[in-house]
Every structure is written in C-alpha cells, then in structure tokens.
C-alpha cells in the first residue's frame, strides 16, 4: 500500500481547494511551498508520487509547460476523504419552521432529459445546417419541451463551446471530444474566467442554441443516448436502450456526477461545493453553513444548490434566518410487482413517481403527455396511436405494455379506443417512420422481445462516471470516510515505497551526483564556509536541512541566503511535526490546503535565521520516496 | 396499490387520490372541504385546489399551516413549495374584503387601507366604488353588487358578501303531510345537506345527478326561506312539472303558483318561467320584453333549474339581482360554451355536489349499465359516407340505416321494459317510429300532446317512446329503464349525461343505456367525447360490436 506523506495529503487538499479538476502548472506549484510548512522538494516529490500512483494526471507536451490535473472522478473520491463533513441534520421537530423557497416545480434531471430526448426521437433528430450549425426553429421547439430555463443555468459553467452563440460555435462544441478540448492547456485564472463567463449574460441563446438544450444535447452525447450524424443529432438506439435500463436514481446519480465532472469542474469553487454537497445524505435538512464548514465558498454553494434545485434534486429554504437545503430522496422504483401506471377509463394514464425510465419513454412514444409533474399524466389519443405505429407498435403491443405496467386489464373504453385507432392506417405527418422503426426495434419493448440480442448493451453507459452521491442512509453525514484504495495506472497495487528511480532523483535534485554524499547522509559539523555551501545547495533544491543547535535538533527550511564577507545568514523557518492533540483552537500556520486536517498531526512553523557563526551540525534532508 | 400514501399533489394544484386506499373515505371527506372534485373515473379521483376552494376552506376555519400540514400528511412527498405559497396567499386574502349594509348603504370594508387602494386599482371593480367613508371603507353602488364581486374575484380578491339578502315577499309554505302516495314528503339526507349548504352559503349551485331529486332541493329551499320565488327552467314541460311538484308536495295552492311562458303570463308568489321567455325581444338590439318579471317583484329566491343551460342575457340580468338569493340546480356543471366561471360569479359557487356513482351506490338513483353498440354501415351507406364532404359525414353516420336493426334487437332484448329511443335527427326518428310503430315526441309536438304521451308512458300504456332532444332535460319519466340513443349532438358531454339521466330514477332493476355508434366513422370520436363526462363520473361503458 502506498504510504501517504503529510505533504501529499496537504497537496491534494491544496489542489482540490484551489484547482478542483482544473489543470495547474509548475509555476503555480512553486508558490505553494510558501503557503505551508513544505519545501519545494517535498512538493515536487509529492507531485511525482501522486502521478505515479495514478491520482494525478501529467501532461508533458513537446511544447509549453508540463501540467498536472486531478481528474474529476478522482477529485470527487478524494474530496470526501480530505474534507470530511461535520454536520448534523436539523431535528425533525424543527422542520416545521422551515420555509421552503417557492421555486417553480422542477423535474429530476433524468426525467427532464428523457422528455427532450423523447421529443428529439419523435421529430427524427435535430437537423444540422450545411455548415454544421443547428436548425434553429427545431432547436427552439426542443427547448420548449424543457422546464429548465437559461436563467437557471446562469451560475453554472456549461462548456462555452457548446453554449457559444452562433451556429458555427455550437456545431463545433457538441461532440464527445469536447471534454478534452476544454481541458487542453493551462488557463490561468480559469476559476474566475469560468465563473465570470457563466454570469456575464453572454452565454445565452442569442444567435445560438438555447443553453438548456445545449446541456441536454451535451449530456445526451456524453451518456451515449444521442449520437452525432453528418446531418443531425439523433437518438442512438443502443445507447438509449442502455440508458433506459438504469434505475431512476442510478440515472440521476450518474447525471449529477456528470454535471460535477463536466460543468462544475470548470470552476474550482463550484466543483468544491458540488463535491461537498454530494456528501450530505438525502432526505434531511442541513444548514448551508455546514456545507460551507468544509471550506466551500458560500457563493459557490448558493450557485450549486440553486442549480441542483433546478435539476429537481434539491430543495432550499430558510430556517430561523439560516439558509437550509435538503437533497431529495429518489422515489422507490417499481420492481414490477407494484404497478407504476394507472390506466383510467377516460383514456388518461397516470404515471406514478415510482415508474422507471423505460416505461416512461415508451409512453412518450404511444401517448400524448398532458402533465409532467409529480405524477405524469398522458392521454391515449388517435394521434398518439398513429405515432406509436411509426415506432413499430401494434395495438396488441400497446395493450400488453399498458396491462403489464398497470397490472390490470385495460378498461373497456380504452381497449375500444385503441382498437379503433390502430385500425386506422394513415401515419402522422412530418415524421420519419424509418427512424422510428429502427429506434423502436433496437430499444423498445415490443421489438426487443423479438430481438433479444439488442437488449441492454452496456457500452455507452460505461462512459457515465461513477456516482458522486454518498449513499449513506443514516441521517448523519459520512464523518470518517476511508481513503480510496490506491492503484497505479496499470492497476497494480502499489506496495513499493523505496528509493527514487535514478532518473527521477537527478530530475528532482539536479547535480546530486556531484554533491558530496556526506552532505545528505548524516549531520556533521562543517567549516562555516562549507556549511554555507550545504545551506545554499539545500536552497537550490528547495529542500530542508536538519540542524543541531542549542542542544536540540530541528528542521530548518531555508528561503533566502545572504553572504557578507566571510559570514553568511540564511533566512527561513523552523518546522516541527506535532500530534493532533497539540492543535490549539487558533493554531497558526494553517493554509487553504490544511483547513480540514483536523484530527491529523500538523506542522508548527516559526520564522528563523541561521548564521555561519551559530551553526553546529547539519545535513541536507531529502524527502523520501 | 402497494404504497402507503393515497394522495399525490401536483404543483399546479391538482390532487390525485387513490380511491382504493383503505383510508380513502377519510381523505375524501377532507378533500371535499378544501378542493373541487374534477372527476372520478374508475377508482381514481382528481381534485383541484382553486382560489375558490381555498377561500371556502378559509371560510370553514382552515388556516394555511393547518391545511398544508394535513395535505402533507396525506401525501408522502409534501406540498410543492410554490403551491404551498399559493395556498398561503389565497387563505390570507380571504376575509380582507367584506360587503356590508350600514344605515341603508352598501359598503365595502377592507382589512387595511392598502386593501382599499387595491380595490380601487382593480379597474372593473373600481367603477362601482363611491366615496370613501374612512380609510378602510368605501360605499358601493347597490346595482353593481354582483359585478363588483365578480370583478374583484376575477382579480383574485374575494369579497365576503355580508350585505344580506332581501327577504322577499313573505310566503307561508310547508311540505304536505301526505302527497297522495301515502308517504309524507321528506328530504333525503343529501338533499337536506344540499339545502343547508345553500342556505348557509347564501347563494350558489347544487350539483346532483339526474334522478337524484334536484327539484326537491329547490322545494326544500323554498320551504326553508318562506319567500316569494321565481323559478326559471329550460322549457315548458319543465314548467309544468315544477308546478305539479310544487302543488303536490307543498302546501302551495294552484292560485299561488303561476306559469310564465310563451302561452301564459301568470305572475304569482311562486312563478315558474322559461329562460326563453326572458330572452325574448322584438329586435336583435331591442330591450328584453319580459325583463320586468325579474325586476318588478321582490323575489326573495330565484331558482335556476338546469343552470348549465342559462343563456347569456339571463347572466346579465342576474348580475343586477344580487339582493335576491340565487340557487342553481344542475346535474352537469359542464357548459359547452365554457362559461362555468360566470355561473360561479353570478349565481354563486358550487355549494354542494355528490358524484353520480356515490348517489347510485346509496341506491337513490338507478344502477345503470352503459353500452356502446358499434353498428357497421352497409356497403352502399359506407360508400355514400366515404364520398360525402366532411361536413355531411356526421349526419350520414348518425342516420346509418342499419341502426334500425340494432334498435330492433335491443327492443327484443328488453321486451316489456319502458324504453326511450332518443335521437338528434328528426328524419331518423320518424323512420324508426314508423318501423316500430312508436309514438314520437319532437319540438313540433304540441305541449298538451307531449304531456299526454308522457303520462301514457308513465302509466305503462306505451312501452317505448321515440323522443328528440326536447326530452333531454327536465322530463319526468320515472319508470323509463332503457334508453337507446340512436344519434346525438356531435360531442356534447352534457347531452349524453342528461339522456342517461332520463332512466336514472330509482327502480328495482338496473337501467340500461345504449348508444349506437356507426363503426368506422367520425361518430366514434364524437361518442368518445360525449362519454367523457360520465366516464369522469365513474361510469364504465362496455362496447358491443353488432353484426
């Protein structure tokens, strides 16, 4: 197993707090040493080790600077370990004092997307212009299927290449490769830029794709439900089939993770807030201040909770003057034994909250929706049946679907109506039957039974990142999460914690081969001029020294060196590792990266000087790999 | 259903309730007081929280927190926040505006000076407001009482009308001790509840199924209020039936009850008139000739029978009659012209309603079996139908000649049972009357002749009677147990319900309602729409394919 150094833990916290899943470069690293008790060498080594065990990604382009990043999925896992949440839910008897925000009703995102994807399927896809742009009227019609508004996305950095105004920009942006493009290179000030971009009002539909639709398309492509063809963006039957095989909560968890990874990760503060909020268990109210206690930025928390509320996953409110939130509990999904549909004699179909995605999507094909709310209400109509036929459904298949999902025979008026309407032959206008049939054949219930090979291919869903949400069922937040198991990039358990490989050593400590080994091996007394050289070497490598003076030993980290005539003086700080029990209520030296290391040993630092005349024994301390 | 909560709450205020839940009866009683029943097909009930229902809830003493807490307890997922805010808002606004009478003046009293400003900012309401009495009170022009309330309600500002009603000319009236049947006239429990709800509420509408005794509710109100009363009905037959009931069941004498129709103009302490006579005028823009019937007598109570048929001019007259109590009676508060809100505003809110199936379940109306019979067209008729312009197809489908064969089969099936054959097209009805040697009642049939035929039917001397739409409403044929609808007015929901209503008087055996529909024609879709109201009331149609 990998043995974690204090520096590595500090570094991960620092990266999470400062960069989230955004890339950073060596120039930024250099400044960090000054933030904590660490030497530059320790930071460099920590980076090296984190890369080696696969926690950090390193990019070394032939041009430009080397950069690193904490992949979003990895960042999510580490967040829970490094920034444990300390919060209790509001007592149940206090909940009566909560005044929930009177926001407009929003569906869980899995259902919101299902509606727009179903509409996309019904209209045969979103056509692209010759130049690759989107057909705006069609896009507007699809956007009208959504309750989510552009204003609700204002605080969230939807990738600008998707949201960019103008057909060209939009056309370029929506593709699976968009993720890598967005992450190319280091963008200084990425945090501010992304947030500003999200809030400057420039990311609107003017001249381009409505933002909410851009998101629906982006997520659809990312999840494999949609595919880009030369002339359109359309539903990918096999991807859709795999998606619909997910449970409702699975789909929402996957989407929540995807939003954090693709959108929030462009803004470190937002990403941090997203990670923190995901750790609060669903179904209980918490104070937003508790989430801020993890170190999350209050503004980012407000923005992300607002977005989560718009995605139908979270409620917000006020309690005794404090902002509070509650992650919604997903409905228990029907296991098939409990009917999720109710078919009424007046041709209405009620879809209960427990209904799964597949059942809902099929209804989108065979009936006309009149309400999308807690309960979805559909109406069986002649037009709906005409459409169903284009998807390859016959009367018997619709009857069988409705009876199976409702667990009861259909009321006589419904049976009669379906018999009438399926007896009609005229297809609905403005649709592409061949598309529908293909889609239904590969995805839908009736044809699936005939074609078992097409059932539930799992390919595209594997691209969905692992769920973000902590699924603890108790009311307590996960106080002491265990560290993720560490694997190298090859997947091999990393039990090695030994010497530097030769190349690494020279790279980390240039010129080490020419340095007298005794300088590194043990403390010795040197002539002041030699001692000065040792100190200067440590300074050059930005590493620490071990010194003895005044009868004690300590670690000194040099930060500056001045020579006057035959005397010298080194400026720096002395550091001492203390047990957690020594941490006072206002312990100094804490930095952004240390904010939540409570319960762990910590380093006490104090400024110090060493002078040539005072030095006793010393040696250079190289961090151990 | 496998879930513990029997209620789902939609963010738009719809409440969906599971009638199969063991606690549903308790839930229904609760919802009945705070929401409006929209429909109840099968065993699923749809209610709606409306401003009006919430004002009623507030009037009944519900607080917003209490109501939201109760709703939340019935559902697993709480009340959507925006809806909860709306509930709070509507309950808070109730009681802020009151109409009162002080020293002979009609006054608007507001809870706060800002409320009075709000009323003045409501353009349609402000025109009826006069000088301010103080910072919270202003005078209201008495003739604008109805329109003022209507305008305020439309602006979401309910006015509690405590100005009272004129007593009307006093009238001593009671139920007879015996009505000739050997039993003393007595209101059923639900009829008594309806009368109480109306009298307590002041004015409003009572919705009961056909055959459930709405006339009795009218008589009960009259007896309770003891005042001179104007009764408005849709046709002359109904006028006669009201007069018969009034003189048979109550102590009123024939000298105290008058008919005001095209043929007779009797104005008496209780006067029964038709809507038609009230809307009569010499020219399209001329004055209504008989408007004086409304205005010139101090009616204490006006009863609007079949209020869903109330013509627009009568609405306007009603707006000026807010000092008299107004009782609307109907089985189907469904207006094909969509003016239900005018009924609410000018007659009053719905004060009482019982779903049809609930009354049926209690045995107060006949259990009915509804069947749609699909009748194919023969080759020639189908060809004519196919070649006909779209506008002519409904009639060709309605008059499908093969329906006669289906009627014959049904008459055989129900041989000896009192049967009505109801249709829309007179030619079709005449042909059927000829084929089956049936008496026929249409609009052309003189009233005396109609009544004679109805009486013969009721005495069992005629076993089957063909009737046009004149018999849709207010025709009392209590023994009719089979109705065969051979054609109808396109997709009219209320016509279907009213026609079913002809056979719903309680009887020992179940009633049978057949609607003949030409298969493969536009009539199928009309039929689907026509059935909507009854399906929503919980009736289930079976379908038979006639060959």
Image (spheres, helix red, strand yellow):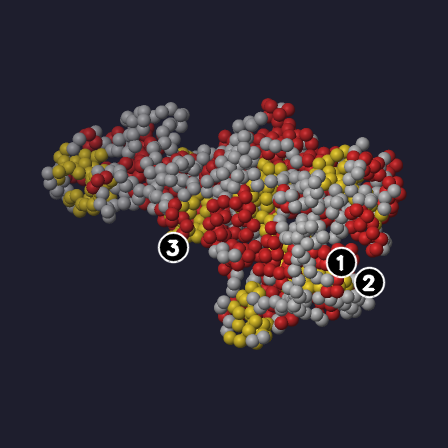
Circles 1 and 2, Cβ within 8 Å, touching? The answer is no
**Nearest the eye: B83 or A433:** B83
Percent x, y for residue B258?
A: 75, 63
Q: Are marks 1 and 2 on the same chain?
A: yes
Callout 3 secondary element:
loop
Above or below A389: residue A604? below
Check the image and name the residue furthest to the left: A551
Circles 2 and 3, Cβ within 8 Å, touching? The answer is no
Callout 2 secondary element:
loop
**Quadrant of the drawing holding the N terminus of chain B:** top right
Eye-nearest disc, 3 or 1: 1
Q: Which residue is drawn at the image coordinates 67% and 50% (left, top)?
A: B183
Q: CA distance from mark 2 to mark 3?
A: 74 Å
Above or below B513: residue B257? below
Percent x, y for residue B477?
A: 76, 48
Please name the residue that numbered disc 2 is placed on. B263
Say which label, 1 or 2, has the lower sequence index. Answer: 1
Percent x, y for residue B97?
A: 54, 66
Eye-nearest disc, 2 or 3: 2
Above or below A370: residue B227? below
**Nearest the eye: B366 or A55:** B366
Callout 1 secondary element:
helix
Residue B170's image quarter? bottom right
Q: Which residue is drawn at the image coordinates 69% and 43% (left, top)?
A: B366
Q: Is residue A37 visible?
A: yes
Q: Which residue is drawn at the image coordinates 76% and 44% (left, top)?
A: B480
Instruction: Say which mark, if any, is on residue A321.
Output: 3
Question: Alpha-carbon neighbours of circle 2 within 10 Å: few (<14), some, or many (≥20)?
Answer: few
Above or below B221: residue B181? above
Q: Are marks 2 and 3 on the same chain?
A: no
Q: CA distance from mark 1 to mark 2?
A: 12 Å
Please name the residue that numbered disc 1 is placed on. B239
């Amino acid at each position: 197993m990998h043995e974690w150094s204090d520096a590595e833990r500090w570094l991960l916290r620092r990266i999470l707090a400062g960069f989230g899943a955004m890339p950073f470069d060596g120039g930024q690293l250099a400044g960090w040493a000054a933030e904590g008790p660490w030497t530059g060498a320790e930071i460099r080594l920590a980076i090296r080790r984190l890369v080696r065990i696969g926690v950090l990604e390193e990019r070394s382009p032939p041009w430009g600077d080397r950069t690193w990043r904490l992949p979003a999925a990895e960042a999510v896992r580490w967040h829970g370990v490094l920034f444990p949440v300390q919060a209790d839910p509001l007592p149940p008897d206090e909940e009566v004092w909560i005044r929930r925000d009177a926001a407009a009703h929003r569906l869980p995102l899995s259902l919101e997307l299902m509606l727009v994807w179903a509409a996309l399927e019904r209209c045969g896809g979103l056509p692209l212009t010759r130049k690759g742009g989107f057909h705006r009227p069609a896009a507007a019609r699809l956007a009208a299927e959504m309750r989510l508004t552009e204003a609700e996305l204002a605080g969230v950095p939807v990738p600008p290449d998707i949201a960019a105004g103008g057909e060209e920009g939009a056309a370029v942006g929506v593709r699976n490769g968009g993720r890598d493009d967005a992450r190319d290179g280091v963008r200084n000030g990425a945090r501010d830029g992304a947030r500003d971009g999200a809030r400057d009002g420039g990311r609107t539909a003017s001249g381009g794709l409505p933002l909410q639709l851009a998101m629906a398309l982006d997520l659809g492509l990312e999840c494999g439900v949609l595919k880009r063809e030369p002339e359109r963006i359309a539903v990918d039957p096999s991807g859709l089939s795999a998606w619909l095989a997910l449970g409702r909560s699975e789909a929402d968890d996957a989407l929540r993770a995807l939003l954090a990874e693709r959108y929030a990760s462009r803004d470190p503060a937002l990403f941090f807030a997203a990670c923190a909020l995901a750790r609060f268990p669903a179904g209980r109210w918490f104070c937003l201040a508790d989430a801020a206690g993890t170190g999350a930025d209050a503004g980012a928390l407000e923005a992300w909770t607002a977005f989560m509320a718009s995605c139908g996953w979270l409620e917000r409110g006020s309690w005794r003057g404090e902002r509070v939130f509650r992650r919604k509990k997903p409905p228990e999904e029907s296991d098939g034994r409990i009917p999720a549909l109710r078919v009424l004699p007046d041709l209405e179909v009620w879809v209960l909250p427990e209904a799964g995605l597949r059942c809902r999507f099929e209804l989108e094909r065979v009936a006309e929706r009149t309400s999308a709310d807690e309960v979805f209400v559909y109406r069986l109509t002649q037009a709906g049946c005409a459409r169903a036929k284009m998807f390859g459904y016959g009367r018997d298949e619709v009857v069988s679907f409705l009876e199976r999902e409702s667990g009861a025979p259909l009321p006589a008026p419904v049976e009669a109506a379906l018999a009438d309407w399926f007896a009609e032959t005229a297809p609905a206008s403005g649709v592409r039957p061949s598309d529908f049939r293909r889609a239904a054949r590969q995805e839908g219930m009736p044809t699936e039974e005939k074609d078992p090979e097409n059932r539930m291919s799992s390919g595209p869903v594997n691209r969905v990142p692992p769920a973000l949400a902590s699924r603890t069922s108790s009311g307590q937040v996960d106080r002491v999460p265990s560290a993720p198991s560490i694997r190298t990039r090859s997947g091999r358990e990393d039990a090695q914690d030994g010497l530097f490989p030769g190349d690494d050593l020279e790279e980390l400590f240039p010129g080490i081969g020419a340095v007298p080994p005794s300088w590194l091996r043990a403390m010795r007394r040197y002539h002041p001029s030699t001692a000065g050289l040792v100190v200067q070497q440590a300074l050059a490598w930005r590493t620490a020294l071990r010194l003895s003076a005044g009868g004690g030993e300590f670690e000194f980290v040099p930060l500056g060196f001045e020579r006057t005539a035959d005397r010298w003086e080194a400026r720096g700080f002395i550091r001492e590792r203390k047990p957690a029990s020594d941490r006072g209520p206002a312990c100094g030296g804490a930095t952004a990266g240390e904010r939540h290391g409570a319960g762990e040993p910590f380093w006490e630092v104090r400024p110090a000087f060493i002078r040539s005349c005072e030095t006793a024994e010393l040696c250079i301390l190289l961090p151990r790999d | 259903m496998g879930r513990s909560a029997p209620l789902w709450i939609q963010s738009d205020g719809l409440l969906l309730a599971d009638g199969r839940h063991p606690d549903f009866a308790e839930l229904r009683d609760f919802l009945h007081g705070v929401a409006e029943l929209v429909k109840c097909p099968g065993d699923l009930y749809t209610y709606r929280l409306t401003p009006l229902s919430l004002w009623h809830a507030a009037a009944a003493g519900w607080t917003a927190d209490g109501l939201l807490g109760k709703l939340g307890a019935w559902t697993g997922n709480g009340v959507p926040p925006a809806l909860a805010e709306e509930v709070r808002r509507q309950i808070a606004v109730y009681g802020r505006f009151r109409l009162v009478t002080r020293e002979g003046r009609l006054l608007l009293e507001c809870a706060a000076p800002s409320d009075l400003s709000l009323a003045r900012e409501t353009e349609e309401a402000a025109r009826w407001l006069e000088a301010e009495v103080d910072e919270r009170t202003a005078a209201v022009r008495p003739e604008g009482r109805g329109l003022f309330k209507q305008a305020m309600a439309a602006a979401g500002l309910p006015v509690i009308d405590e100005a009272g009603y004129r007593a009307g000319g006093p009238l001593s009236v009671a139920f007879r001790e015996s009505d000739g049947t050997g039993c003393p006239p007595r209101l059923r429990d639900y009829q008594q509840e309806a009368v109480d709800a109306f009298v307590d509420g002041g004015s409003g509408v009572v919705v009961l199924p056909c055959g459930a005794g709405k006339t009795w509710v009218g008589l009960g109100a009259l007896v309770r209020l003891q005042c001179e009363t104007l009764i408005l009905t849709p046709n002359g037959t109904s006028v006669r039936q009201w007069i018969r009931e009034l003189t048979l069941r109550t102590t009123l004498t024939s000298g105290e009850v008058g008919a005001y129709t095209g043929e007779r103009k009797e104005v008496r302490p209780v006067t029964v008139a038709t809507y038609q006579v009230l809307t009569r005028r010499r020219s399209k823009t001329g004055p209504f000739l008989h408007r004086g019937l409304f205005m010139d007598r101090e009616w204490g109570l006006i009863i609007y029978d079949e209020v869903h048929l109330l013509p627009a001019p009568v609405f306007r007259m009603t707006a000026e009659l807010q000092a008299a109590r107004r009782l609307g009676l109907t089985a189907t508060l469904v207006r094909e012209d969509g003016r239900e809100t005018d009924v609410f505003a000018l007659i009053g809110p719905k004060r009482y309603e019982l779903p049809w199936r609930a009354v049926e379940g209690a045995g107060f109306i006949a259990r009915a079996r509804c069947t749609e019979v699909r009748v194919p067209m023969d080759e020639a008729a189908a060809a004519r139908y196919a070649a006909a312009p779209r506008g002519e197809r409904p009639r060709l489908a309605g008059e499908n000649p093969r329906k006669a064969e289906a009627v014959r089969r049904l008459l055989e099936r129900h041989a000896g049972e009192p049967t009505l054959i109801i249709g829309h097209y007179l030619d079709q009805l005449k042909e059927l009357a000829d084929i089956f040697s049936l008496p026929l009642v249409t609009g052309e049939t003189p009233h005396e002749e109609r009544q004679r035929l109805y009486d013969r039917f009721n005495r069992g001397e005629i076993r089957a009677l063909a009737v046009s739409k004149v018999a849709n409403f207010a025709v009392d044929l209590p023994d009719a147990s089979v109705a065969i609808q051979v054609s109808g007015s396109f997709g009219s929901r209320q016509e279907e319900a009213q026609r079913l209503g002809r056979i719903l008087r309680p009887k020992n055996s179940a009633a049978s309602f057949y609607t003949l529909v030409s298969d493969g024609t536009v009539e199928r879709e009309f039929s689907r729409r026509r059935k909507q109201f009854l399906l929503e009331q919980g009736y289930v149609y079976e379908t038979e394919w006639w060959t």
